[in-house]
C-alpha cells in the first residue's frame, strides 16, 4: 500500500492530469464488458451535459459589442470532464468517450485521482482484488485528509462540490442464503433496509466483505465521500450474459431447453439498461443511502424465464434436469449455476418509490421475449439466409444446397425429404410428451410439492390440443398413402414456417418449378408478416404499395440461385456419375430434362415470379464435369451471400472441417 501511495505522489512519468485529483473525472472499470458498455453510455450523457453547462456559464461572462470590457489575460483552461477506465480485453487501445484506458496493473493510482468511481464486482471475480486494494488506499487517504481542506484543481463535478463518490455494483448473491424474515410467510420479499440481515452464498463471501467495507467507509467519512452499494439482480438484455446459453439454444431450436430442477425458484432480474440508468440517476442525484436493490418489481421464477424463450423462439420443448447435472453442459459455469438456482424474493423500494426509475419495460420477462430476442439477434448479428436453388435435373442442386446449409447453419428443405423430416420431428416430440419433462428428476417430496404449485394450468388445454393434433398428423403421415401436389406443397410451407427455419434460415432444393407453385407456396393466406416485438416497417414507395400485397414477405427468399447448363452437359454429367452414386437411365434423364425445359420457357419460368418482386436470380453457369462436389459453383454463391452471420460458437460448430470460402477470397 505504501508503495502505491509513493508511486501516486512521486512518479514523474505521469502527467499533471494524472496526479491531480479532479471531481470532473469519472472512473469505470471494465468499460468493454456487458455491464460496462451500458454504464459508459449513461455516464457519457452526464459528461456531455456538464460540459455543455460549463461552456454556457463561460459564455455568459463575456460581454460583446459596445459594452465590451477588457477581460484581462485569458484564464487557464478548465480541467475537462473526462472518463478513465479499464478493459477486459488488453488489445483494446481506445473507446469512444473514454479519455484514457488504464492498464489494470497501474489503475490504482489513476482511480485515486477520480472524483466519481463506478466499480462493478458482479460480473468479473478478478475485479475483487483490485477493488479491495483500492479501498485500502482510499481509506488511508481519507484518514490523512480527515479534517483538512481537500486540495483540488476544480470545483465542479457531479453531486456535491469537493466530495468523492463511489458506486459499487455488486450482486444479490450476497443475500443467497438469507433466511426468510418470517418463517410462516416465506414469500415475504426482502427490501433495502434488510441488508444488515443478508447472508452471502458461500461463493460470494468476498463480495459480501467488499460491500461491508464500502458501507463502513460511507459511514465513517460521510463528509468526504458518498458511497453506496447496488445489489444487482441477474442482468439480461442486449447480447445477454447469464442467459446467453438459453437464448442461444432457443434460437438454434435445440430439441430441449434445460430447466435446472423443477424451476420454481424465484430469480431477481434487472434489465442491463435499467441497471445503467440507476447508475446514471445516482451520479446525477446522489442519495443519503448505503444500500439499494436493483431488481425488477415482477416476481419471476426460473421456468418463467426459460419457458417463454422455448415457446416463442425455440422448439417449445423442455427437460427438467437435476441441478447438479447442469455442470455436464459445457456452457454452464459455476456463476451461471449459482444465479439460475438462486431463490430470493426482493422488492426494489428505493428505485420505485424515491428514484421513480423509468423502466425499460414494465412488462414481465415472458411478455418481453419477442423484443428481447430481436435485440439479441441484432447485437449478435444473427441474420437468417433464405435460399432457393433452381436448375435442371442432375446439375448438382442437392449437393450445392447441402454445402450452403453446412457452411451457414441453415435448414435443408426438399420435396423429397420434407415428409420424413416432419415425421421425425413429431416422433421425438410425442415420445417426450409421453415421458414428461420431469422424467429425469426424482419424485418430489410433499414439502417440494407444496412449495412448487403448477403454474402452467392456463396453458394445459392448449398444450393438450397441440399434442392431439400432432398425434393425428403423425398417424396420417405414417399411413403410407401417396400425397398429392397440394398436400406436399403445404408440408413444404409448414417446414419453411417452423420456428427453426424462421430463426436460422433455410435452403429450398429444386422447388418451386412452376409459376403456379410459386404463387401457392408464397401466398399470404392467413399468415402475418409482422410478429410481436417487431418494429413497424418504413412507408413503402408508391410504386411498391401493391408489390407484396398477395405474398408472405417473411417467406420470400433472399437469394435465388439459378444453375444453368446445356442439355448435352446434363446428359453427359448423368453418364459420368461417380461410382457409388445412384444413376438414372438415359430415358429418365431425358424425360425429366424435357419437363424442366417446358416449365422454364422465357414467359413461363418461375424465375419471372421472383424478378417481378425485385429478387433477381443469381445465374451461375455449370461447366465442369469433374466438379461433382460443386465447389466452384459454391464459391460464386458464397461471394454473393457474404460471411455467415453467426456468433463465434456457431461458426466453429458449422464450419468444423469445412471452409465456406472454398475457392473464394477472404470476405469477412
Image: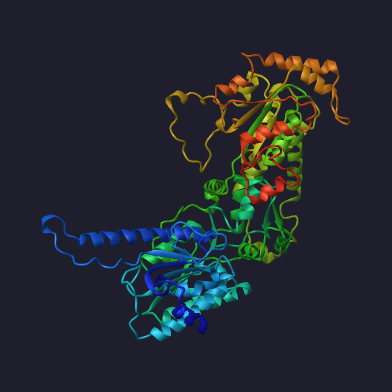
* Residue 299 appearing in the image: no
In the picture, the quarter occupied by the C terminus is: top right
Looking at the image, which residue sits at the far left?
Answer: 66
The image's colouring method is rainbow
Quadrant of the rendered image containing residue 635 = top right
Percent from the top left, x then y, of residue 421?
Answer: 74, 36
**Total residue callouts:** 0
Percent from the top left, x then y, of residue 476?
Answer: 76, 31
Depicted 284 relative to depicted 462: above or below: below
Taking the spot 48% from the left edge, 79% from the top edge, the residue there is: 7
Percent from the top left, x then y, of residue 146?
Answer: 38, 85
Q: Nearer the viewer, residue 474 or 69?
A: 69
Percent from the top left, x then y, of residue 345?
Answer: 54, 65
Looking at the image, which residue sits at the far right?
Answer: 579
Relative placement, left or right, of 86 versus 263 is left
Depicted 309 relative to depicted 175: above or below: above
Q: Nearer the viewer, residue 473 or 662?
A: 662
Depicted 176 relative to depicted 43: above or below: below
Relative placement, left or right, of 294 versus 584 is left
* Residue 530 appearing in the image: yes
Amino acid at each position: 500500500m505504501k508503495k502505491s501511495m509513493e508511486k501516486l505522489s512521486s512518479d514523474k512519468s505521469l502527467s499533471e492530469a494524472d496526479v491531480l485529483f479532479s471531481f470532473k473525472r469519472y472512473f469505470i472499470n471494465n468499460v468493454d464488458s456487458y455491464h460496462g458498455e451500458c454504464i459508459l453510455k449513461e455516464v457519457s450523457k452526464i459528461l456531455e451535459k456538464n460540459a455543455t453547462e460549463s461552456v454556457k456559464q463561460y459564455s455568459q461572462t463575456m460581454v460583446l459589442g459596445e459594452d465590451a470590457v477588457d477581460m484581462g489575460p485569458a484564464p487557464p483552461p478548465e480541467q475537462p470532464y473526462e472518463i478513465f477506465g479499464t478493459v477486459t480485453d488488453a488489445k483494446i487501445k481506445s473507446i469512444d468517450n473514454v479519455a484514457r484506458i488504464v492498464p489494470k496493473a497501474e489503475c490504482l493510482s489513476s482511480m485515486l485521482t477520480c472524483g466519481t468511481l463506478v466499480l462493478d464486482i458482479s460480473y468479473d471475480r478478478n475485479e475483487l482484488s483490485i477493488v479491495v486494494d483500492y479501498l485500502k488506499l482510499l481509506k488511508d487517504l481519507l484518514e490523512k485528509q480527515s479534517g483538512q481542506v481537500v486540495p483540488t484543481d476544480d470545483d465542479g463535478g457531479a453531486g456535491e462540490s469537493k466530495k468523492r463518490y463511489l458506486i459499487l455494483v455488486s450482486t444479490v448473491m450476497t443475500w443467497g442464503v438469507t433466511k426468510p424474515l418470517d418463517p410462516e410467510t416465506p414469500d415475504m420479499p426482502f427490501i433495502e433496509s434488510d441488508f444488515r440481515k443478508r447472508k452471502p452464498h458461500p461463493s460470494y463471501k468476498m463480495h459480501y466483505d467488499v460491500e461491508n467495507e464500502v458501507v463502513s467507509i460511507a459511514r465513517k467519512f460521510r463528509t468526504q465521500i458518498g458511497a453506496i452499494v447496488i445489489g444487482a439482480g441477474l442482468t439480461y438484455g442486449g447480447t445477454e450474459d447469464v442467459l446467453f446459453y438459453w437464448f442461444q439454444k432457443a434460437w438454434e431450436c435445440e430439441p430441449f431447453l434445460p430447466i435446472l430442477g423443477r424451476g420454481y425458484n424465484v430469480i431477481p432480474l434487472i434489465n442491463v439498461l435499467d441497471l445503467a440508468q440507476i447508475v446514471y440517476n445516482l451520479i446525477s442525484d446522489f442519495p443519503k443511502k448505503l444500500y439499494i436493490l436493483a431488481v425488477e418489481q415482477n416476481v419471476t421464477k426460473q421456468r418463467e424465464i426459460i419457458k417463454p424463450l422455448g415457446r416463442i423462439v425455440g422448439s417449445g420443448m423442455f427437460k427438467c434436469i437435476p441441478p447438479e447435472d447442469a455442470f455436464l453442459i459445457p456452457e454452464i459455469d459455476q456463476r451461471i449455476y449459482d444465479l439460475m438456482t438462486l431463490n430470493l424474493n426482493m422488492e426494489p423500494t428505493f428505485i420505485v418509490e424515491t428514484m421513480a426509475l423509468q423502466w425499460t419495460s414494465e412488462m414481465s420477462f415472458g411478455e418481453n421475449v419477442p423484443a428481447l430476442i430481436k435485440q439479441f439477434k441484432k447485437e449478435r448479428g444473427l441474420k437468417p439466409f433464405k435460399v432457393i436453388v433452381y436448375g435442371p435435373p442432375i446439375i448438382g442442386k442437392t449437393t450445392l444446397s447441402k454445402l450452403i446449409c453446412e457452411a451457414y447453419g441453415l435448414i435443408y428443405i426438399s420435396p423429397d425429404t420434407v415428409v420424413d423430416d416432419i415425421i421425425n420431428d413429431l416422433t421425438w416430440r410425442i415420445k417426450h410428451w409421453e415421458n414428461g419433462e420431469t422424467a429425469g428428476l426424482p419424485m418430489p417430496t410433499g414439502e417440494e410439492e407444496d412449495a412448487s404449485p403448477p403454474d402452467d394450468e392456463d396453458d394445459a388445454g392448449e398444450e393438450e390440443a397441440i399434442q392431439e393434433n400432432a398425434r393425428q398428423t403423425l398417424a396420417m403421415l405414417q399411413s403410407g398413402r401417396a400425397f398429392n401436389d397440394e398436400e406436399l406443397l403445404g408440408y413444404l410451407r409448414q417446414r419453411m414456417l417452423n420456428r427453426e427455419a424462421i430463426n436460422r434460415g433455410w435452403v429450398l432444393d429444386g422447388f418451386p418449378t412452376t409459376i403456379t407453385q410459386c404463387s401457392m407456396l408464397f401466398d399470404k393466406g392467413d399468415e402475418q408478416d409482422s410478429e410481436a416485438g417487431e418494429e413497424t416497417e418504413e412507408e413503402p414507395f408508391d410504386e411498391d404499395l401493391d408489390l407484396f400485397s398477395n405474398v408472405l414477405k417473411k417467406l420470400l427468399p433472399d437469394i435465388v440461385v439459378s444453375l444453368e447448363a446445356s442439355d448435352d452437359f446434363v446428359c453427359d454429367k448423368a453418364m459420368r456419375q461417380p461410382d457409388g452414386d445412384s444413376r438414372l437411365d438415359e430415358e429418365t434423364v431425358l424425360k425429366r430434362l424435357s419437363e424442366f425445359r417446358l416449365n422454364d420457357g422465357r414467359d413461363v419460368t418461375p424465375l419471372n415470379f421472383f424478378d417481378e418482386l425485385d429478387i433477381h436470380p443469381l445465374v451461375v453457369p455449370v461447366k465442369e464435369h469433374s466438379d461433382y462436389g460443386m465447389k466452384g459453383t459454391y464459391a460464386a454463391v458464397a461471394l454473393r451471400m457474404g460471411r455467415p452471420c453467426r456468433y463465434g460458437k456457431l461458426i466453429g460448430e458449422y464450419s468444423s472441417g469445412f471452409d465456406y470460402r472454398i475457392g473464394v477470397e477472404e470476405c469477412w
